[in-house]
Amino acid sequence: MRVSRAQAEANREAVINAASRLFREHGFDGIGLKDLMKGAGLTQGGFYKQFESKDDLAAQASRRAMEHATRRWSAVAAASPDPLEAVIELYLSLGHREEKSAGCPLVALGADAARQSEEVRAPFQDGVQAHLQILDELMPEAESPNTYGKAMAMLSLMVGAVTISRILNDEEMSQRFLNAAADEARRIAASAGKA
């Protein structure tokens, strides 16, 4: 049975959305095409009509995940009287630590992405730059021109803290990593406004 162009596009979007979630949950090599398609409610047969390869899907799913993450930061920042604090609290929270399939793709897939093709890594670079831009814009007005460098340090700290907190079995230590990173991120932000 032939599907309409609109249905084919809806199916493609469903596969990208499912892959975005499933790759973050299982890693790029931890799930096969059959299960990715099943996650979208489709059979594997139509995969190559929609995507050139698994790398093509991984790149598109990664772009979708990174765009979702930056939109989420922007939304939480826009809704708060203290936008940078809102981003820090959202990112360095127990909720985000537990949100493996919908959380930050830098945490879920960062090390895995480093071993992938340039096609798959490209959305991560774009996403890192988008995250840095948000952080840089949220930094207090600075007399120092190095707010972008501080944004880089803050993003590195935050991604690392969530990654480590997810690894640990010790709940108390996991929480301490998140708290310490939040305190340090606030210190970095406060120092951005000083010469």
Image: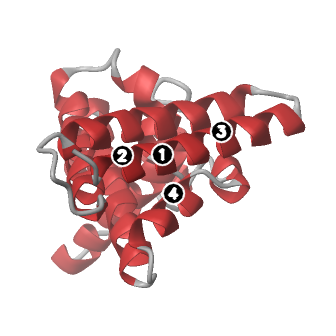
Q: Residue 113 sits in which quadrant?
A: top left
Pick whichever of labels 2 and 3 is earlier in the sequence. 3
Which numbered disc, 4 or 3, marks the residue closer to the eye? 3
The amino acid pointed to by label 1 is Arg
Q: Which residue is mark 1?
A: 187
The residue lying at 69 percent from left, 35 percent from top is: 177
Circles 1 and 4: CB atoms closer than 8 Å: no
Residue 129, disc: none
The residue lying at 29 percent from left, 58 percent from top is: 139
Pick whichever of labels 4 and 2 is earlier in the sequence. 4
In the image, residue 38 lies at what x, y percent? Answer: 54, 52
The residue lying at 33 percent from left, 70 percent from top is: 74
- Label 4 – label 3 distance at C-alpha: 12 Å
Q: Which residue is mark 2?
A: 191
- Label 2 – label 3 distance at C-alpha: 17 Å
User: Is 96 positioned to the left or the right of 70 in the image?
Assistant: right
- Crowding at dot 3, Cα within 10 Å, few <14 / some 14-19 / many 20+, comes out as some
Pick whichever of labels 1 and 4 is earlier in the sequence. 4
- Crowding at dot 4, Cα within 10 Å, few <14 / some 14-19 / many 20+, comes out as many
Q: Which residue is mark 4?
A: 88
Q: Secondary structure at mark 3?
A: helix
The amino acid pointed to by label 3 is Ala
Which numbered disc, 1 or 4, marks the residue closer to the eye? 1
